[in-house]
Image (tube, coloured by chain):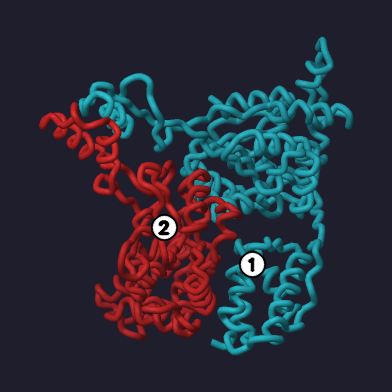
Amino acid sequence: MAGDDHEGPAEADAAALAVLFTRALRQAGLEAALGSVIMFLEAIEAVGPTDRRAVYWAGRSTLVHRPEDIELYDQVFDAFWVGSRPMPARVVVTEQVTIAYDDPDDAQGGEAPEAEPSSQPTLRVRYSDVEVLKDKDFALCTVAELDEARRLMSKIRLTGARRPSRRPRRSKTPTSRLDLRRTVRHALRSDGEALRRAYRTHGERNRRLVLLLDISGSMEAYSRALLRFVHAAVVGRTKVEAFTLGTRLSRLTRELQTRDPDEALARAARSVEDWSGGTRLGESLRRFNDEWGVRGMARGAIVVILSDGWDRGEPALLAEQMERLERVAFRVIWVNPLKASPGYAPLAQGMAAALPHVDAFIEGHSLASLEELADVIAS
Amino acid sequence: MTSPPSSVDEVRAGLEANGYLPDDGLATAVFLALRLHRPLLLEGEAGVGKTEVAKALSRWTGGRLIRLQCYEGIDSSQAVYEWDYSRQLLHLRTAEAVGRASETSESQLEDELYSPRFLVRRPLLAAIDYGEGPPPVLLVDEVDRADDEFEAFLLEILSDYQVTVPELGTFSAEVPPLVVVTSNRTRDVHDALKRRCLYHWVEHPDFEREVRIVSVKAPGVAAPLARQVAHATQAMRDMGLYKPPGVAETLDWAEALQLIGASELTEANVDATLGAVLKYREDQQRVRADGMAAVLAAVRGA
């Protein structure tokens, strides 16, 4: 093998170059853990450092762990070893597309939907600040109130939603399943006679919860507040997945796993490139179904869509994708912050198309309504 | 194969001789897995041939294929080892019947019960404590279906290729088994496990490779038909279908067409055999409604 013949300086150079390469990758935003770097060096030694293609694949199989990173790896590889492409910048700046809001119900444009809830404020009299805040529409909250609301939001616990698991556990009362391992242990103590029998029962596990948050322009008044709720769900419960829907689909589970809410939200904001852009609910949902949902993530899961249902795409596409989702999910819950406004009817084409495939349709404009959501999820 | 391969080309030749045609990336990843004694993690769409890799490796290396199919709730009694309880109970009863139970001490009876003869070796233990012969190929299939706890525990075993049975001691492999882990990516596999493994994202094969795969795996299919089928499935992969056809579907389809006596693709026989290649009603409808022309054009254009 080529690598074995190159002892001495050449070998050392190759190793040094390889380390520099991993540093370039890191600078471009592709994290390579020390263990992976060491494995990369071993791999280069095994394939021989002279063949560029071999080095490419040695790095691909040791430093890249997800298909999303392949493109970045290719760029850095070309820039570093070939010099044919510039080194990618760490922050991938994409063009912020701000799409003028286009009301699908009204060809003339009409009023901006974010103004809709605030145009009909609900007046309520309550005794304490917290009580008032509980029912206050996020869109009407002051900055201070929103901070307080977010703090309270992290207290909402998404419990319940259990399902039977195949993993058995010990049972105190007799069941139809004998725990043979324990029974044998007991029998040892009674001269081989299985006098005391131990039983097992099936355990329980959390059902997977998938949260899909609409971050389009029309949801602006709510999406940032709701993101805090999504964060609380991701850190407060096992088996939660979070995505944003906008002009594209972004998975936020990893970013939101950081416990510190500010840090988590900052990370989420950095990784999502289409805040307050247009809405392609049907298209984003199709991507969710194709890449994650129907493959397994949504199977048997509770899927919560947090959206006002305004969609610039074809309603037929949204209906088709909702139907696919409904077929694999355990339950589909649609949370619509606009539902709380008096006289609301699901007229937005997207909402109307999606409703037949929704198991529960609830509000999501205030703390109280999010508590209700927690109850619906647990039920 | 007796010693580790000395080059990537040797791996490619070895796999090809055993019915699997790898691309450069996969051949390199397999080569490195064999040389560095690391597990190989394969991710990719369903039907791109991830499981086949392990089977071909087993045929090539001569190591026994040990398969562990993962599912939700899988635990160590199904994955590593379990005691044969009914035989243990029987042994106790026998001891009692011949009057040994009262004279033998409890600890001695216990030693008898927890001896290798009552140990049931599940795939992970079997792959480590394999005895003589070439190291086996351990296929941990669809690891994304198991839960996180299982992954942590798999990582522990794959780190030092050791299993400890409290009653018996530690089993370890002198030459570790070749481990192939597959995932359909319904959820992320833990980073720690990924870092331990060599990673390869398995893509659909390109046209030429797909034609070769058909000729190797379905030798009964005539070459012109094989080329047409490969053109057609490649075209279908660009149609935004729910489930783009994988290699497995290409093979099924080619064989189905050959069985009904087709020598080339026509609208009629594509329509009749569409169920062999597309498994969703909506996908079939889409191809029948607007994709048929594109499929046939891809075939004719070739």
For the point 36% across and 65% down, which residue is it?
A: B136
Chain identifier of the red chain: B
- Chain of the residue under label 1: A
Look at the image and tell me in which quarter the N terminus of chain B lies: bottom left
Residue at point 70%, 76% (across, down): A18
Q: Residue flagged by tag 1: what amino acid is it?
A: Leu
Residue type of the residue flagged with mark 2: Ser
Disc sitting over residue A63 in the figure: 1
Q: Is residue B224 above or below residue A130?
A: below
The answer to which quarter of the image holds residue A20 is bottom right
Foreground residue among B36 and A258: B36
Q: Is residue B213 left or right of residue A355?
A: left
Task: Report the residue at 67% width, 37% height from top.
Answer: A235
Q: Which residue is mark 2?
A: B172
* Relative to B173, A132 lies left or right: right
Residue A140's spot in the image, x, y percent?
A: 84, 29
Specify the quadrant of the image occupied by residue A116.
top right
Q: Position of residue A27 (x, y in %)?
A: 78, 66
